[in-house]
Structure formats: structure tokens, C-alpha cells
Amino acid sequence: MLNFDPVGDFFRDNVIEPIQDTVIDPVQEAIADVQDAVTESLFDPLADAIGFDQLLSQYAPPQLVAPDGSAIDAATTALEGNVVVLIHGWQSSYETFNSLFTTLGSQYPDRQVVGLDWSALADLPGDAFEFGGFQARPDNTARAISYVAETITTQLQTLFDVTGSELTVIGHSLGSLVASEIGRLYGEVSDPLEQLVALDPAAFAKDYDLDGRGKGQFASSFFPFPGNPFAPNDKRTVKDFNTVAQESLALVVMEELNPLGGLAGDNDFAQTAHDSFLVDFPFFAGPAEKHNAVISVFDAAIAANYFNLDRDDFGIPPHTDDVYNNFGSTIGRWLPGGNSSGHEGIITANLDGTITQYQPQPLLIVEPLQLSGEATGSVENLSDGLSPADGQVSTAGEPTGDGESGPQSPVADELLDLTGMDGALAVGITLEREAAFDNLLQFYATDALGAVAGILPGEAGYEDAVRQNLLAQPILSVANGAVGQETIVLAGGTYYAPALLVKGNPADLVTVEDGLLGSDRIQRDGNVWQFEDATDFDFNDLVLTVTAINSVTATIV
């Protein structure tokens, strides 16, 4: 699904880029010059006099902390099983993650969630120049990153015996560069890091020297000409996220018509993650507000099960890679000199973290999948391999092939009954839509009564249970006024219920429960499910038709 965005592209070419060239770039260059001058006058002489190692020793060392801030001592506390380390950024502390600590602990009780507190080092002298509420790049603080990463990696490996396959690191801003360094160090001495999440990785990511202990690291770059004898030697730069972890995910503030909106994050470096999502915030918010709000968005995404640490690829559904450029546009990304496209999805959110739309670019299958092996079932031959009495897809409580009835349920007519077939099933479908909203369709497994996690439709907590148990794939969509054909794969042996995500937002679900609550928004007629997303009750806001169900006896090719 392409986003045709000629207006956005026009503004990018005729407004944003001229502003970038004539205003933003000169300002950033001026900031860099002042930063160099401050560094040269305040920080470098001190570092040259006593050495960077000695300078670092004057500050409290980095340490692992519990959610309450207490230090984690290997002598009294074991880190067993899977471990999640939260890493704050510049001029911050572990308290940045207070809410995320709680969410991760609730969602993943079998994981130990700890913080990396390097707050004493995360504000070294020489980083204080301020411009419009946003401070200049923290070159001197960045020089401590390798030291911080080495200290914590040594503790994790030697004191706590945490292997790379057991470790997830989540970093915000400059903390995402610390996360990359931890991944690099793990890869050099043991098994690779399992998961890395970068939350609005710091701007100028590739420009920083991460290790101030090398020869010449304290010299100013005030004269950046080739061969400059004062330029730093042995500069250590950050490694791409996809090279230091088995799986990596980045969330970064989307660049926009507000030139300062995404100034604090590095959109290009975010693209080095295996998957990166642009976060689209309200237009007039400032860069610091948006930069910090990305943490809240990730918190909400974990709570809503958009991202799942227990699933491969963070539970992101099948999608098209490298679709969106930094402005969230898909048009013109192949043109020479165009803004590169390296992002897989867009999350629209408010500054409090509330997600109003989650949209990975779907991997649309315009033709049915080609399946090897024999097809052993169809919509006329489903249930347990025998034709249902009405010759259509059966529902919970209908007679099956052996003449017996299953349990009755008020929502039985809206369930898809695949209990009569085992293994992977190729389900042919068509989708239609006559709606302004970009709605999405997902499925969730139920019992014969429509219950999820033991909660029946109409009982308290049902919709939350649905949200937590939506299948990561497929996520289905179709353009307004269009008809699409796809083949999806579902596991046999269970019941499924459809859920409509209005505007792609799982906070606004249409489920089989709605009819019990007095607002029926799903209708079914044989093999056709019709959905209503608002209040006009035309039931054409998404229409799903099941056209074939075949058992897959070999792999999909």
C-alpha cells in the first residue's frame, strides 16, 4: 500500500529542504563551532592534564540498578533467565523509565528488568551550550560511552553470567549508542546480543567519538581539514544496530514541516535497525518534548502488544521493508538524491504516549500463495473433513460432520470454526472497503464460547484480553473502494474471532462482544463478515469473505 503524498513531497522539496539549507544547517554548524570552543577551553585542558581515565574516575561509576534505584549487587542478587537492561540518555537517569519498568515487569514476569544508571557520567563538562530549549550535541559525554559499556558488559558477563542470548538492551537517545556498544562487546567475546531497542537514537550518532581514552582524543576538531594534526586519532564510532544484535528495533521522531520537530533524533541512523518505525507527534511540539515522549510511546506499544519481546522480530507482522523516508512519504524514494527510505512503519501518537494509529507497511499478497502439497479441504468441505449441513463455513454450536452439536454461544455465529482440521491452513480471502478510515483486521483464537484467556464476551476485561492476544499475523487491510485477494495461514484445531482495528488503533476495537453490549458492529452471512467502524451502520467499512480453506501438507513456496 503506497502513500501517495504529493503535497508532502512538494513541501519537502520547496519548503523543508530550503529551510534546512539556509537556516537549520548554518545554525547546527554554528552550534558545533561553539561546542568545539567550549570543549577546547573547558574540557580538553583538564582531560589532557590528568588523562581521560583519571577524569572518569572522579565520577560515580555506572551501575546496574533495580526499578527503585537501589544498586544490584552480584553477591546478593542473581540475574537469572532473560534480562532486560534499560539505558537512559544524556542528562537523565534511570527514573526516565519509571513507567516502562512497571509495564515490562507486568508483561514479562519471567524476565528481570534492570536499569543502567550512568547519570554521573551522562553530563560531563562542556556540553552545556543551549539553543532554543534544545542543547547542543554532547560530544564530551559521548566520549564516556565505551567506558560505560565496557564496565556494564564486564559485570553482566563475569559477575552475573548473563549470555547474549539472554539479554535485551533498550536505550533512549545517547543510551541507544551505549546499547550498541554493549552489543559490539558481547559479539566480540561471546554469543551475540539477542535484542536491541533504540528509542529516538541521539542526533549526530555517527559523528561522536565514543571513547575518550585513545591517543589524541582530547584535541579540538576546530580545524577539521584533512591531515589536521590536532584531529582525534583512533576515533571509535557507533556500530549499526543490525550488526550488534540478532534482532533490533528503532523508534524515531518523524521529520516534518516543523523543521525542529525531529531535531533531537537521528532518523538516518535509526534505519540501521532491522525494523524502524517513525513516530508522528502533534505538529507544534518541540524537539525535546517529542524526544522524551518516544519512551512513553514504546511503553504504550508494549502494553498494547504492538511489540512483543517474546516473539521473533518483536512480534511485528509481515511487512514491506524500507518503505518510508524520514518524512513518512513513499513517493519519490527511488529518485536519485531523494530522501532515503529505510523505515518499515509509522506510529501516530500524542505526547503522553497514547497511540492513535499503528501502521507497519503490510506485506500485501495480491495473488493467493502458491502451496505445495495436496489441498484437503475447502469452504464446502471444512469442519472435520465432511460437508457441514448448510454447505458453508461452520460456526461454534453448528452440527459438525458427525451430527453432534458443540456448545451454544451468543457469539457463535461470528466465530470461524477450524477445529475440524489440523496443521497449517491456507485460507483464501477477499477484502473490500467503503470507508474513510484506514481500518485493519486481525484475528484472535477463542474457545467455542468466544472466550479469551478464560474471559467470556461481555465479562469485564474481555476487550483488554483481546488486545493482548491478537495474532501478530496476519494484519489485513485494503484501500478504500478497492477489492483485494489474499491467502493467509492460520493454525487449525481452534476457533477464531475477527477484530477490526478502527483507524488501525487497537484502543478502538470492534469485536464479537459489541453485540452483547448493545451495539452490534459485526454481521455475518455465510462466508461473509461485514464490519461497522462508526455509527452509520452501513456495514461496509470492511468486508471479509472466506473463499477457500485448504490444509497445507508441505511448506509454502
Image (spheres, grey):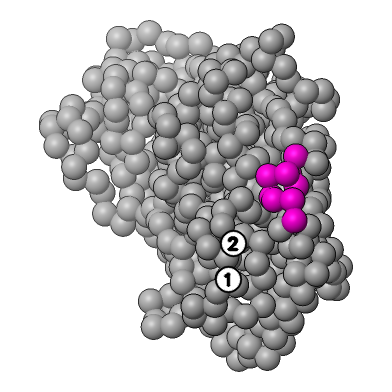
SS category of the residue bearing label 1:
loop
Give the quarter of the figure containing the C terminus. top left
**Which amino acid type is shown beneath numbered disc 1?**
Ala
Residue at 35% x, 45% y is 429
Few, some or many C-alpha atoms within 10 Å of disc 2 (few <14, some 14-19, many ≥20)?
some
**Which amino acid type is shown beneath numbered disc 2?**
Gly
> Label 1, on which residue?
231
Query: Is residue 80 depicted above or below 372 in this figure?
Result: above
Residue at 74% x, 81% y is 30
Q: Which range is magenta?
A: 49-57
SS category of the residue bearing label 2:
loop
Residue 118 location (% of width, % of height): 74, 39
Secondary structure character of the magenta stretch overall: helix
User: Is residue 391 found left or right of 8 in the rendered image?
Assistant: left
Residue projecting furthest to the front: 49
Query: Is residue 83 depicted above or below 29 in this figure?
Result: above
Give the quarter of the figure containing the N terminus. bottom left
Residue 461 visible in the shown view: no
> Label 2, on which residue?
216
User: Is residue 289 found left or right of 25 in the rendered image?
Assistant: right
* Mark found first going from the N terminus, 2 or 1: 2
Q: Nearer the viewer, residue 301 or 135?
A: 135
Labels 2 and 1 touching (C-beta < 8 A): yes
Q: Which of 268 and 530 is in front in this view?
A: 268
Residue at 70% x, 86% y is 26
Label 2 to label 1, Cα distance in Å?
7 Å
| Quarter of the rendering containing residue 379 | top left
Residue 509 location (% of width, % of height): 65, 41
Circle number at residue 471: none
Few, some or many C-alpha atoms within 10 Å of disc 1 (few <14, some 14-19, many ≥20)?
some
